[in-house]
Image (tube, rainbow, N blue to C red):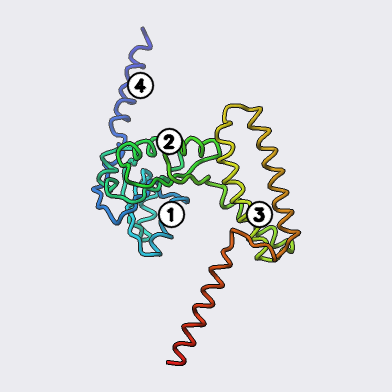
Amino acid sequence: MPITPLLMMAYGRLADRLATTDLPPEPDAIEPQGSVVIAGFGRFGQIVGRLLLAHGHAVTVLDHDMETIEQLRRYGFRVFYGDASRIDLLQSAGAAEAAIIVVATDARETTDGIVEAVRRHFPQAQVLARATDRGHAYELTEAGAHLVVRETFGSALETGVEALRRLGMPAYEAERAGRLFRRHDARMMQRLAPMRGDDGRYGAAVREASAQLLQVLERDRERGREVFDEGWDTSSLVEEVRRTALERNAAASG
């Protein structure tokens, strides 16, 4: 009993503190821009958005981190505050008319929810999603995402290619090795998908695929530059050079 007044005082102070705590701001009034919606504008989403903007594509960007939004706005980016997992906000952002919706959020559960919502309510849009790892990539593919990109795969592969160059491999050969690796990995993802959940079969298939990759890269090195690499469309380059030469000759004779 003697401590009851103290507890009541503490409770009163806590209640006052909670009452004065700033609540999350209301979502912005969104003004749709173009036919692309980007959900999440952190490091991953910004690269996608900057590339699209640089090529003249207007985008509508949603993000839930006000501190990030304020910083981006200082740099001239047009970003709206709002939870992209909310159907009404996606609707306001133009998702019903969007050609592409990029899900670049960094929280796995949030990404899952947005992909599911978009596929259910806005089926006309192609969904390009960021995955945290290989397992997540499988889950997003099964959820209906049209393209799934593992968040660290591209940068890791780029680093590997640069390491080859710095170890003395000619730039073209290093880039070709990277392209072969990327293509082989994509094929392996498809091949291994049905084996998920069967650790024995999956592990054996991974070991086999790794051995096959080494064989592919070794054969490519042995054949050298005479090999036609499907990652480099040399026939189109030859055709372009030939066409340019013909046009120049025609202009000169005209």
Q: Position of residue 81 (x, y in %)?
A: 31, 46
- Confirm or deny contact between disc 2 and disc 1 (CB under 8 A): no
Q: Position of residue 96 (x, y in %)?
A: 27, 45
State the SS at label 3: helix
Q: Which mark is residue 10?
A: 4
Q: Which mark is residue 195?
A: none
- Three-letter amino acid code of the residue under disc 3: Gly
Q: Give whichever of 8, 253 is nearer the camera.
A: 253
Residue that carries the numbered disc 2 in the rendered image: 143
State the SS at label 1: helix
Q: Give the CA separation, mark 1 to mark 3.
A: 23 Å
Going from N to C along the chain, the mark reached first, 4 or 1, is: 4
Select label 1 or label 3 by which is in front.
Answer: 3
Q: Position of residue 217 (x, y in %)?
A: 70, 53
Determine crowd level at label 2: few under 14, some 14-19, many 20+ residues with C-alpha closer than 10 A.
some
Quarter placement of the N terminus: top left
